[in-house]
Amino acid sequence: MKTTFSVIKADVGGWPGHATVHPDLEKIAYKSLLEAQREKIITDFHVTHCGDDLELIMTHTNGADCKEVHELAWNTFLAATEKARDLGLYGAGQDMLSDAFSGNVRGMGPGVAEIEFTERKAEPVITFLMDKTEPGAFNYPIFKIFADPFNTAGLVIDPSIHSGFIFEVWDIQEHKHVFLRTPEEMYDLLALIGAKSRFVVKRVFPKEDSKLPAKEPVSAISTEKLYQIAGEYVGKDDPVGIVRAQSGLPAVGEVLEGFTNAHLVSGWMRGSHNGPLMPVSVKDAKCTRFDGPPRVVALGFQLKNAKITQPVDLFDDPAFNRVREEALHITDYMRRMGPFEPHRLPMEDMEYTTLPKVMKKLGTRFKKFK
Ligand code: F6R
Ligand code: MG
Ligand code: MG
């Protein structure tokens, strides 16, 4: 029997503004998932948040895109939205972009990362939860983890991962995907995923000679684009990702090493600014300064027979103090740029924000010059 690991998230109301999730919403979600566990729709679960996003981490044996599991997530977000309305939370129901559930939450507002796989004897799984950024924020760390020998020592010294991995990259504008093999096609891969607002890593697969089944992903990232669903700016698409680790995969420490550079991502204030991604504990996963800076939380689980242990809050560790310090330095530096690019995103990325409305107002005042 294969196990499915599903992470489904939505912003259904912020507290205050877009800072964090009110604990009452997490309580509602916990109750809803506990009931579903009793009814055997899911095997196990954990509810948490990152910034203003409510995160449902679920395990089950129903496969990816299972209607019952997606419906459970949708109904849980609806119940939490109702509570958010009662409490007067900000932007209640923000990511619930559809009127009725249609069989799958994809394309309805929530973000989804799911993997179905055969459990090994011991199965470490890490979920990454980001706020105030977009799916392309995962490109850099996922590349480092699975393809950079300076990050992942195992790529050089462990014969079980020495032959590398296969990356599935989505072109989210053209709705096409391509599979690229590393290390052979590493430069082609980088040519694409360096353009992180258009090309995003969707999944990573082992190679044919791996002891892991070739068709089962070892990592998956949510790639929902809210503006494509809503047709206008409704917040960034704060993504989630799943990474499996150890025995034929990068070690937990090699996975976490991918997040030690406070790399620049798009999002932050009004989804319109570049800024550093700061790894934080759940306790610090609230977006404050300039609605940020963008944050990432890492929760580590061991999985057995689709049951999960309590999570370990992996960035809750002094080993990440320096990268947090660096993120804060970068924050000071970038903020001094104010409304100037490249702190503010380039015009083509501002297309779906509120800026075009401001530009329109100026439209008739522009006259041709010679
Ligand atoms: C970014 C985000 C916030 C809001 C900002 C303005 O993803 O959610 O930075 O864009 O707080 O919010 P509104 O327009 O709701 O006042
Ligand atoms: Mg919000
Ligand atoms: Mg958010």
Image (cartoon, helix red, strand yellow):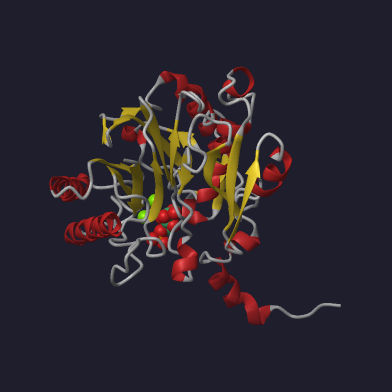
**301 with respect to 183 (left or right):** left
- Out of 323 and 298, give the one closest to the viewer: 298
Q: Nearer the viewer, residue 274 or 184?
A: 184
Give above or below for 22 relative to 198: above
**Residue 326: x, y in percent?**
54, 29
The residue depicted at 57 percent of the width and 59 percent of the height is: 172
- Against 65, is 275 above or below? above
Quadrant of the rendered structure where residue 4 is?
A: top left
**Which of the 4 image quarters holds residue 261?**
top right
Which quadrant: the N terminus?
Answer: top left
Left or right: 120, with 190 as reference point: left
Q: Along the horizontal axis of the image, is 347 left or right of 322?
A: right
Query: Residue 357, how many percent across, how many down?
Result: 54, 72
The spot of residue 168 in percent (x, y) is: 57, 48
Depth check: give the residue in front, 367 or 224. 224
Identify the residue at image location x=19%, y=61%: 82
Q: Position of residue 19 (x, y in %)?
A: 35, 47
Q: Name the residue at 61% across, 46% down.
A: 337
210 versus 38 height, above or below = above
Where is 11 relative to 288, above or below?
Answer: below
Query: Considering the image in quadrants, where does the C terminus appear?
Result: bottom right
Residue 344 seen from this side:
no
Residue lying farthest top? Answer: 157
Q: Please state which of residues 226 and 174 is positioned toward the viewer in this rendering.
A: 174
Q: Count the marks.
A: 0
The quarter of the picture showing ligand 1? bottom left
Asked if residue 368 shows in the view, the reply is yes
